[in-house]
Image: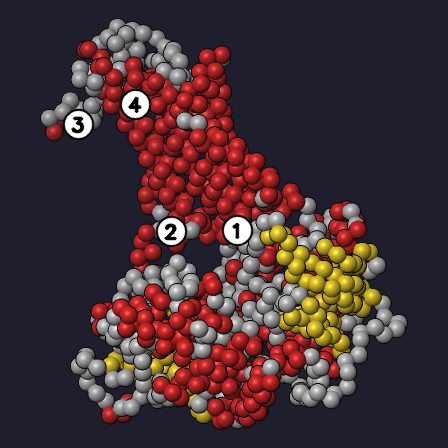
Amino acid sequence: MSNTNKKMPKNLTSIAEVEDAKLAVASETSKSQSRIVLERFLHHKPAMISAIILVLITLLAFTSIGYGPIPGWWKQSYLDAGAVVNGGKPTMSLLPTWLGGSGIQIGEHPFGQDSIGKDYFALVMNGTQKSIIIGVVVGLVATVIGAIIGALAGYFRGWVDEALMRITDLFIVIPLLVLAAVLGQIAGRGSSSIILLAVALGLVTWTGLARLVRGEILSLREREYVSAAQAMGSKTSRVIFKHLLPNTIGVIVVNATFAIAGAILLESSLSFLGFGVQPPESSLGLLISQYQNAFTTRPWLFWWPGMTIVAIALSVNFLGDGLRDAFDPRHSGKRRRRAGLFAMPTRKEKP
Amino acid sequence: MSHAAPTNDATEGYALSFDNLQVTFETAGPDVHAVKGLSLAVKPGEVVALVGESGSGKSVTSTAAMGLLPGNANVSGVAKVGNVNVVGLDAGKMRKMRATDIAMVFQEPMTALNPVLTIERQLTEALELHGIAYGKEATARAVELLALVGIPEPAKRIKQYPHQFSGGQRQRIVIAMAISCDPKVIIADEPTTALDVTVQAEILDLLRELKDRLNTGILLITHNMGVVADMADQVAVMFQGNLVETGTVDQVLLHPKHEYTQRLLSAVPKLSPVVIDANAAHAEQTASKGRELVLEAKDLVLEYDMRGTKFRAVEGVSFDVAKGEVLGIVGESGSGKSTIAKAVIGLLPVAEGSLSVKGHNLPKLSPREARKVRKSIGVIFQDPAASLNPRFPIGECITEPMVVHKEGTKASRIQRAMELLDAVKLPRSVVNRYPHELSGGQRQRVCIARALTMNPELLIADEPTSALDVSVQAVVLEMLQDLQRDFNFACLFVSHDLAVVDMLADYVVVMQSGRAVEQGKVKTVLHAPQHDYTRRLLAAAPVPDPHEQAVRREAWRTLNATK
């Protein structure tokens, strides 16, 4: 307000004039809502750090061992067994010699080797790839299904809502792990395709988002701009996909990130139980399950995949937090403490 | 009072006084200076009206006196309740003063009461907190209070919950809560804005009576000049955080000195003098020959489906609007006036009767034909904050009807948006701006532009100015009048404000609980009303002239007495 006041004509005596004058001198470039959200997001430090970590992990996982036919820069394959060197201990050292370590070096097997001499770095990278693919695919599938079902139920209400929500309830009451295990078995066995497993998981994890989107749409559909769109003769599809769904983007994006984190953990649990990814392909959960007995003797076989899961899941969660705060600043804890009506006594003037 | 405070002779005897009050808010952007040095005093038994439009700082002033400003507010200067300066006062001491020294009546009685507690619990809460009365004694006092504010059968009704009372009764209960601990001053923040005119008149009567009986000072915050004329002894006018004019109600309302006050008063729509006389000529029906009818309703019945049971919102209403005419529909909340607008724009099916636009009977049309008919209907809604999609830039909002009806190319659409922005006097550069960057009045002008995109033959305006400030309302109404002259469309104008309808409409339908009680030409219906309800509506609407208002208040009382 203060910076526009300087350029404004003085002695205005009507609110309407003041507002028009403000608009006329408003020089700052127009910002769309998504731009404002993006700026807020970029200023959210934990989210930004998480984003960088996530990008680095993704790059490392895909470039090191390559994906499919494309070769990576890491020379050893996760499929080849070899001689176990030095009990399979990690050769990576991060302590410089002047601190009493053995110098900064990566060595032949930075993460060590497993019991049959496979390079553990390559195995973990392979598992990380699987986790990221599963996370992204499940996130996409679950989000698309959840958003559409939620939007249809919320918009049409009545029997459509009843039918869709009862189906949702059905998916919720079936224990997720059991359902996923059965689907995962069917999907994973045939072609051992990780994408199929991911789609199967996506098909059972959309329920939470569907309910949230339905709630949002139920309140948004009473807004006057929706009535305005209906009154000007818009088709129902246009009202839903142009006017309603874009305005629930906050809920959708935030929940998509949490769905990704959940999916990664779900895949790990499935693989740990033996229902997910099957050997010789590897996944982080599978690695942990295979080497759980080696925890006391060769702990790195547990720690590397374990820590990678934690790093990915935490980063995605922080990313989700950042997005949620960016979309709705009222939900961020910091501001809530300051803006509450009865929260703090009125401060005296600053000295 | 127990708190020791330095007494100042100058403010002795005031219930509430401000001296050079300054409030600044820290925001993410530059600091906002909301109140810039305000000095004001309220004597016991006196009503001081703090008048201003949105953003003038009037509510911030009252919130500062209650010590309820949020944490990012910096307050300086003096705000005295009795003899205690509440600026910077310890939170615990401030809490003790609330209700016993200073109390508040809120705008929205629906949300000011807790829906899960009985009235008894809520009324006795303040009494017990401040140690005035406990248990049965407190309940007895609460019943007394309810009787005082005019709730019938208080002993029985005190056990009820807020939803079992009407809006006006709820506001009475809020007032009862405010006076429960005999405060020195009551801050009434827009106490009647959410209420219908007839209820507003009753609540104002009650406040006036209580103030005289209890000798309480009232700081009345309002934007309604009619309420000021009705209630206030002193008036203070705020504009952009500054106090621009103070004086007695006669001085300020009849001989305003500051230019802002003058313009504010001239912006208030006024009803031309009303003859509330039973012998006036009978209102004629609207049917006259040679008119090109655009909208015609015959024995219209509209129903809402409330989980299986039908609720009749409109029953047997007939009216017509011809090209170039404006038909006003007036009534209080729940009268079914907006329901009619909803049915015309196709958001509600017609239950019985006919509703035809240019000879096409809407209930009989197929969805495709209905879409075609809707092309010739433009709509303006009440809330400019909600009627534009926040994700669409203004240009897209305006041209959306063209996109929906697949008309024009990209270039011609942009051209049309520019023309319309010129028509509603907004700079062309706003096409790329977003709704949240515009003020309410500007957004409402964008809505008008959007309604005119397809050159409609019929414009539906559902309370288009009731969410706007008076001066902004004046601009928007004038614009509507000009556009109506230029484009010559028929207009269905729904409003609760009789003065606005008087200014804009040619014909009027007065509605009460779903039925049209009186209809005809504006000058006959509003100036020589036949039906008792129309008369009550007219008498209840306050005018910004203290002397005329005093006369009207008497007329209102006699009307009520004869009822």
Which residue is denoted by mark 4 in the rendering? A305
Kind of residue indicated by mark 4? Pro
Type of residue at label 3? Leu
Mark nearest the camera among 2 and 4 is 2
Vertical arrangement, residue A89 with respect to residue A173, above or below: above
Q: Earlier in the sequence, mark 2 or mark 4?
A: 4
Residue denoted by label 1: A219
Q: Are marks 2 and 4 on the same chain?
A: yes
Q: Amino acid under label 2? A: His
Q: Please, what secondary structure does the residue beneath circle 3 have?
A: loop
Kind of residue sitting beneath label 1 = Ser
Query: Residue A95: which disc?
Result: 3
Which residue is located at x 55 percent, y 44 percent? A154
What residue is shown with label 2?
A331
Tell me the quarter of the image containing the N terminus of chain B: bottom left
Tell me the distance, in whole angstroms, between the alpha carbons under discs 1 and 4.
Answer: 43 Å
Q: How much space separates mark 2 and mark 4, taking CA atoms?
A: 34 Å
Answer few, some or many: residues within 10 Å of disc 1's Cα (few below 14, many 20 plus, some between 14 and 19).
Answer: few
Marks 3/4 same chain: yes
Task: Say whether residue A106 is left or right of residue A252.
Answer: left
Circle 2 chain: A
